Amino acid sequence: MRNFLNSFLLAFYATFTIISISHAESLQMGISVDQVPVDSSFDGAEIVVFGSIEGAEQAALFRGEYDVVIRVEGAPEDVIIRKKERIGGIWVNNESETYEAVPSFYSILSARPLNLISNSIELGPVSLGIENLGKNIPVEGEKTLIMNPGDFSDALRRLRIEQDLFSEIPGTLKQLSPSLFRARLEIPANVPIGTHKVTAYLFRNGEILNTNESSFRIEKVGFERWIYNLAHENGLLYGIMAVLLAIFTGWAANAIFRKS
Amino acid sequence: MSIYLPIAEMSVNIFILFGMGAAVGFLSGMFGVGGGFLMTPLLIFYNIPPAVAVATEANQIVASSFSGALAHFRKGTVDVKLGTMLLIGGLIGSTLGVYIFSSLRSAGQLDLIISILYVVFLGSIGTLMTIESLNAIRKSKQDNPPVKRKSGHDSWIHALPFKVKFRKSKLYLSIIPILVLGMLVGILAAIMGVGGGFIMVPAMIYLLRVPTNVVIGTSLFQIIFVTGYTTIIQSATNQTVDVVLALILMVGGVIGAQFGAAAGHKLKGEQLRALLGLLVLGVCIRLGYDLVVTPTELFNMIGTAEQGGH
């Protein structure tokens, strides 16, 4: 009996230790900037996400069992997709579908292709990867979700990829040492303004062990910000100023060229 | 050198836009037209969102028409009374136009309607202009005396009630066709992003029988107000006027117009009209081709952020 109890305790401790070890792995992460300014010379930017795998099992680390995947996500928005059809000889927007909560920007940074790191059973619930977008959103009523297969959602993904607003490029994340990583994110010039969420996932043998979250903002600054805010907060005043500017330009041109 | 447009929310090459402004300005100076009908399609070809292109172009036309109208005021070739009548119709039309513009945009048919309107108007005006000017060139070669302007009292338009005297234009005319013409051009101006001079000028000459010497000045006079009003209404309802884009186009446009006007003096009137007619037809064919040919991408999308509905 005593023996049995001892061996039970031993087994319990052993299990507990293993669990505690597997739970000890975590991710530390930092972003090179917390704000990307958009001014009149803005033509895209590059930011760096760096970090380390903490509390990892050294042997597994060297065997390359760990993977880090970083997801950068803009604010969700509703997207209307329209399909052109030939009606009476001309091409007209006909059928349309509306997708809710589509990220305005979506980028996956990883060292290897996602399908080599894990599978859709693991990736789907956390909406990781362009193919798995929206799989974490519960279906409510008549909501059309991006996960629904079909021409329209394929077109949405394709158009967003063409506009550089969706990307999933292996090799964007580099392992500097077995535990240190660095990822480069190319921000296109047409990036949506606002807060972008950065989530890092730590995988071991295809299973998510831990995550870490951070964010950065893309903000119009200076003149661009002033113009944009004025246009949206006081459109009437903005319009009057635009007209006065035009009248002044027209008058100036007339005055300058009349003399010469 | 690239510049970020705050309202269009895209990075563009400032020299390309300046060059576009100067090239269209050159043509408009040469032919005495506003150039909106060339600039708006060019901006759309350059991937500026159509909604921004149309509203911003209205803003640019304020500058070019103001500059042109000043010159006509000095020469005394503006009929302010007639211009004001057209303007009243124009403001009503422009209000309707911006409203139609917004509803077409939310229905996803704005781009299509803009293209169809361009094809229809450019096609018919370009054809008329080319035929008329080619006939004029042939006649001048045969050395025939030019056909005299009809007295205008034979037209059905002159049988309408509510007649008013327009001293400068030497006209005694009902205000109904003037208001209707002003309104129709106002609607088109708001939807198509044009001043409407290319419709207004022929309509004033052929329908209202306004003397040719006051037509351009009067048309420019009312275009300033209609496009200025359109700019303000578009800003207030759709937030689609990009002043940075407008300023680049304005500066390029007014400079190009000076050189264009100088070049225009070297050509005969009918030669100018024939060239303009062919140019108008060219733009029409380009836009019409895009409507008919199978597009490489059948799908298009719009996010709520881009629609202005936050």
Image (spheres, rainbow, N blue to C red):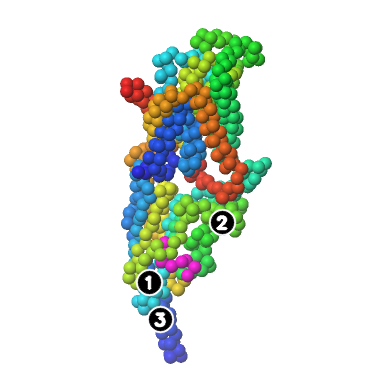
Which of the numbered marks, if any, corresponds to residue A154?
Answer: 2
Q: In the image, what residue type sits under mark 3?
A: Tyr
Magenta residues, as a range? A109-116
Q: Which residue is mark 3?
A: A13
Please state, as top left, top right, bottom left or bottom right, where the C terminus of chain A lies in the image. Answer: top left
Evaluate if marks 2 and 3 touch, with contact meaning CB atoms under 8 Å apart.
no
Residue drawn where x is 37% and y is 27% of the image: A249
- The subunit letter for the residue under badge 1 reads A
Q: Decide: marks 2, 1 in contact (CB < 8 A)? A: no
Task: Mark 2 or mark 1: name the one nearer the start of the chain.
Answer: 1
x and y, in percent, of residue B172 in the image: 57, 9
Within 10 Å of disc 3 (Cα), the crowding (few <14, some 14-19, many 20+) is few
- Does the stretch in magenta take in A114? yes
Chain bearing mark 3: A
The image position of residue B22, as x and y in percent, is 41, 33
For disc 1, the marked residue is: A24
Mark toward the viewer: 2 or 1? 2
What chain letter is assigned to the residue under label 2?
Answer: A
Q: Examine the rendering and report whether any part of residue B160 can be seen.
A: no
Q: CA distance from mark 2 to mark 1?
A: 39 Å
Image quadrant of residue B63? Answer: top left
CA–CA distance in space, label 1 to label 3: 16 Å
Crowding at label 1, few (<14), some or many (≥20) Cα neighbours within 10 Å?
some
